[in-house]
Image (cartoon, rainbow, N blue to C red):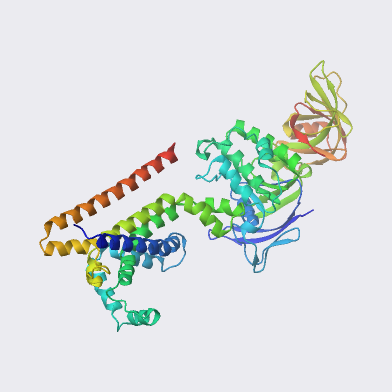
């Protein structure tokens, strides 16, 4: 039987990570799509790095950064009174960095395609920049927000390498589904491994299916 | 009245330069006319605050300062309405949603009601529709209605009829005429189509290569020989006349133009109504004596003010009747044969008179 704590921890990690991703990724994507700065391209490449790097590379650097003697580790210790390495919070930070391109890229594309003319029209009708954002940008990009959130969530559920490097496989704290699966296989508990692997596969398929179906309905509605 | 004072200096990356200093009346219908690329749209965008002109610029609307030195009032606080060339309806909202969007953000809360605006622009049947289902003409009508519902202090229009078929164009022009009569809203209207302008404008700014080359009351300007307007193939004088009486037997209406009688095919209007007429320069011929036994109904006594001094075979003659002007395009040979000179009293035979609009006076 699959440990319910493992599933709950996985969902909690993916949920918290997705929240942070939307919070940080949205302004970042907006800046990448519409900003004028010269460093934009460099930042864009940096954000996309996790797409091509082996997760272990990222995990290795994060492991070093989270160590109690490191600047980040020390700062965290001072601010929160607890260590950062091998904790749930460390996993969240690692996951946010690792899944960032999956959230930023669809949003950046949507913001880039959104015609400036609609924002001008809203401004002329008396909408402040924030109002414009809420009343024009968000509704016109809602499918991309859904895509970004779903991909961020699913990718976090499916991550392995980074978690393995920085999590430390502590049950209830850092042992998520993909790690637990690895654990069971190592221990030759193939039955449990089967239900975990199958469950992950089913979950991922349903998520993508729903996302694509929503996308098709959207484009259908725009055409008709 | 809140007139619009504009002093602009704008240098675009493309090398285009806009430089002008003008005062646009805060009442009635002001048209900005000029060829494409002359800076008409840039002028409008600067007025709306969508483009920020150079720091030497100043834009004032009545007491409000829109731009001066470092001061720059952002678009959403200027209370302007802007109708773009493309309708720019919000695709995620229905027609009603688009109208409500403007109404919700108007400030102050007073202004025309949604029913009133829909009636002006005849949108009653479109309200429940999605904006993507509408034709271009319908979309533009919704865009105009949306701009009006924002209850702006001044309405800017950027060639709103440019991408629209002829039938809807004339329909929308009719709506605009009515709108202007009923709402008293000052309108600045950019166009390169003299027909539209002739029908609606009270005040005219003529632009060329980023500058204003002439500005003043529409009726005066279009008969000025120095302006390119008079030299176009379609050159015409615009005059106003008032209805005197209906001649039911022949299906005609008699108008009075500066005390002289002009007859047009029946217009449904009460005596005393002011009308705007367009008289093409090529449809006027001149006689030294009042012609007798002619089939032409409209013969007006006028005085020659000016004869164009170019060497081409066709010349323009500017005629004065009371306080208004006519233009006549004649061959150089006829002018020589009749020995026409400025100051001379002549009779103008007018072949066609086009009725443009009812004018409020």
Residue B296 at least partly seen? no
Q: Residue at x 60, y 40 (%)?
A: B142
Residue B322 or residue B340, whichever sits in front: B322
Q: How many marks?
A: 0
In this picture, is B143 found above or below A89? above
Residue B2 or residue A196, whichever sits in front: A196
Q: Is residue A186 left or right of residue B68?
A: left
Residue extending farthest left: A188
Q: Residue at x 39, y 62 (%)?
A: A19
Residue A21 in the image: state x and y as whole percent: 38, 63
Residue A176 in the image: state x and y as whole percent: 25, 64
The C terminus of chain A appears in which quarter of the rendering?
top left
Residue A1 in the image: state x and y as whole percent: 18, 57
Q: Is residue B64 left or right of residue A207?
A: right
User: Which corner quadrant of the image does residue B342 belong to?
Assistant: top right
Residue B91 in the image: state x and y as whole percent: 50, 44
User: Which corner quadrant of the image does residue A99 belong to?
Assistant: bottom left
Q: Residue at x 29, y 63 (%)?
A: A9
């Amino acid at each position: 039987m699959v440990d319910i704590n493992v599933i709950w921890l996985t969902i909690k990690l993916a949920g918290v990570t997705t929240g942070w991703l939307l919070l940080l990724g949205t302004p970042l994507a907006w800046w990448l799509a519409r900003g004028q700065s010269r460093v934009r391209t460099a930042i864009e490449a940096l954000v996309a790095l996790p797409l091509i790097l082996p997760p272990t590379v990222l995990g290795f650097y994060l492991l070093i950064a989270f160590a109690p003697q490191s600047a980040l580790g020390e700062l965290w210790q001072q601010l929160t009174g607890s260590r950062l390495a091998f904790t749930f919070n460390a996993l969240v930070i690692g996951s946010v960095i690792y899944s960032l391109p999956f959230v930023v890229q669809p949003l950046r594309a949507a913001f880039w395609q959104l015609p400036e003319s609609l924002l001008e029209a809203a401004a002329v009708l008396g909408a402040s920049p924030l109002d414009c954002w809420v009343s024009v940008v968000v509704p016109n990009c809602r499918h991309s927000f859904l895509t970004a959130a779903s991909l961020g969530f699913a990718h976090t559920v499916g991550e392995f390498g980074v978690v393995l490097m920085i999590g430390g496989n502590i049950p209830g704290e850092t042992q998520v589904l993909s790690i637990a699966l690895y654990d069971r296989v190592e221990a030759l508990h193939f039955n449990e491994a089967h239900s975990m692997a199958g469950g992950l596969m089913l979950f991922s398929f349903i998520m993508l299916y729903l996302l694509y179906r929503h996308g098709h309905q959207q484009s259908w509605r725009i055409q008709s | 009245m809140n007139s619009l004072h504009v002093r602009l200096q704008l240098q675009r990356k493309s090398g285009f330069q806009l430089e002008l200093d003008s005062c646009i009346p805060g009442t009635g219908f002001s048209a900005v006319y000029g060829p494409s690329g002359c800076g008409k749209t840039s002028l409008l965008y600067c007025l709306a605050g969508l483009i920020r002109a150079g720091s030497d610029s100043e834009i004032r609307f009545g007491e409000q300062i829109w731009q001066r030195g470092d001061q720059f009032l952002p678009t959403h606080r200027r209370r302007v309405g802007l109708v773009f060339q493309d309708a720019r309806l919000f695709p995620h909202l229905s027609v009603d949603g688009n109208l409500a969007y403007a109404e919700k953000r108007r400030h102050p809360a007073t202004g025309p009601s949604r029913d009133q605006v829909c009636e002006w622009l005849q949108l009653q049947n479109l309200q429940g529709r999605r904006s993507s289902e509408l034709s271009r003409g319908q979309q533009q009508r919704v865009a105009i209605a949306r701009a009006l519902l924002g209850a702006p202090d001044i309405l800017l229009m950027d060639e709103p009829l440019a991408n629209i078929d002829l039938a809807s164009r004339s329909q929308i022009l009719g709506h605009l005429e009515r709108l202007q009569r009923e709402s008293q809203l000052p309108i600045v209207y950019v166009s390169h189509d003299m027909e539209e302008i002739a029908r609606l404008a009270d005040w005219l700014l003529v632009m060329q290569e980023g500058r204003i080359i002439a500005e003043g009351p529409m009726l005066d300007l279009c008969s000025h020989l120095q302006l390119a307007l008079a030299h176009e193939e379609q050159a015409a004088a615009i005059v106003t006349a008032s209805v005197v009486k209906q001649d039911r037997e022949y299906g005609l209406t008699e108008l009075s133009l500066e005390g002289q009688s002009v007859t047009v095919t029946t217009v449904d209007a009460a005596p005393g109504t002011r009308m705007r007429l367009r008289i093409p320069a090529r449809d006027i011929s001149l006689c030294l004596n009042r012609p007798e036994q002619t089939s032409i109904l409209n013969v007006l006594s006028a005085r020659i003010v000016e004869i164009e001094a170019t060497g081409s075979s066709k010349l323009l003659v500017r005629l004065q009747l009371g306080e208004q002007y006519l233009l006549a395009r004649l061959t150089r040979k006829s002018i020589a044969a009749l020995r026409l000179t400025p100051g001379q009293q002549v009779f103008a035979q007018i072949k066609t008179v086009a009725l443009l609009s009812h004018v409020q006076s």
